[in-house]
Amino acid sequence: MKTKVIPLIVSGILTTGLFSCESETINRRVESPVINQGSAVTNATLVQPKKGKKIKVAILLDTSGSMGGLIEQTKNQLWKIVMELAKSKDVDGLDPDIELALYHYGNSSLSITKGYVQMIQAFTGELDEISEKLFALTTSGGDEYCGAVINTSLSELEWSNNPDDLQVIYIAGNEEFNQGGIGYESACAVAKNKNVIVNTIFCGKRSEGINTFWKHAADLTGGNFASINSDAKTVHYESPYDAQISNLNVELNSTYVSFNKIGIEKKAKQIKEDQNASAYGSGNATKRYLSKSSKVYKNSSWDLVDASKKKGFKVEEINKAHLPDSLSLLTSTELQVRIHQLAGKRTAIKKEMSSLNKQREAFVRSEKAKVTKSDTNMLDDVMIKGLREQAGKKSFTFQSEIN
């Protein structure tokens, strides 16, 4: 059954309580670990996780005048793709380090001297940055130089030298692939040399994509070629569990605490991207919230809990002037205790969200089974299929649920 999309309003979050971890603005309580505050808690108590392999995904979007549908699909489907990445494990059973990057090309507002190409976001694990930049994209007529954007992304982004890491480019557009001064063949040769797979997504008929070299470009690096209907509308399934997950997301946000100059801005961005996701309905918003409960969502550049897990973190070196008032007067030992409490609360919330997600996925599968499957491919379909295939060749596996 195709469900009606009803925008979810996120309200009452940007309050002083947002930045005060001591305030109890939520009816439900989550138990925190009991820690003896009379004894010193050292950084040695924070277990440093063993590092897994890497998955790096660069998304290159045509933002010329005819590509409004492609941008809308990407906005609609970002968190579904992230949720799929959250199911991945490397050959050792470890969580891979997952980063996304974003480029756009073919937009007349961009510099012709740079081939109408612009990096929107370098590789990052802080996915609020990707979401913010994606929602700011607009379309404008221009020339689409696929070779140029591939070549630029290969030279500007920080790719891995480890052949066991999965590194992929997804380039989507609807014009001839062989335009511009930089040939796509040479750009793909550089990609192959860097252990980067180029996947091409043509927005139009498959035969046209083949005739305009989109398939040939993918073949050069062993990538996948696919065609999609970029104007097709994304269907989001609402469930009886969405409201509970939304409430838990508010609690989850309360465990994120800024500790430096950029923290207040980043914290506000976290809430803003919740709102952006909810603008496409509660079903889409729920996917973002669940993504935030997964291993993929990290904010170590500004969040106290995530930063405390990084090697070299020292609570004594925090400038307490940047902490919320409720934490700024704590001693270093007391602050370390509070970090542990926040971490425990976050873990408990994520566990509950994971449990609800199992029930939600079962419900959505049941609803989808009632609907005749469309023959139309969409962006998330081809990206997820390609990621699974190519990750499998690198001995990555995918679990049945996000973690």
Image (spheres, rainbow, N blue to C red):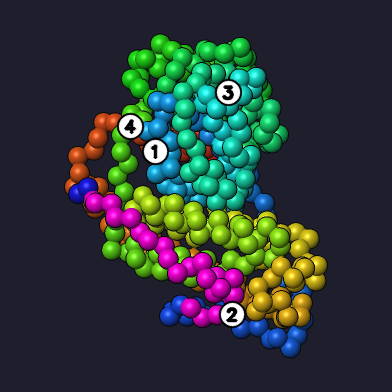
Distance, label 2 to label 3, CA atoms, is 49 Å
Distance, label 2 to label 4, CA atoms, is 47 Å
Distance, label 4 to label 3, CA atoms, is 23 Å
Would you identify the image quadrant in which residue 58 lies? top right
In this view, the residue in front, 357 or 101, is 101
Tell me, yes or no, whether the highlighted magenta stretch contains residue 6: yes
Most prominent secondary structure in the magenta stretch? loop
User: To which residue does mark 3 refer?
Assistant: 116
Closer to us: mark 1 or mark 3?
3
User: To which residue does mark 2 refer?
Assistant: 22
**Mark positioned earlier in the residue sequence (1 or 3):** 1
Distance, label 1 to label 2, CA atoms, is 39 Å
* Residue 367 picture location, percent across and down: 23, 51
User: To which residue does mark 4 refer?
Assistant: 231
Distance, label 1 to label 3, CA atoms, is 22 Å
**Disc 2 residue type?**
Glu
**Mark positioned earlier in the residue sequence (4 or 1):** 1
Dot 3: what SS? Answer: loop
Dot 4: what SS? Answer: loop
Residue 204 in sight here: yes
Closer to us: mark 2 or mark 3?
3
**Disc 1 residue type?**
Gln
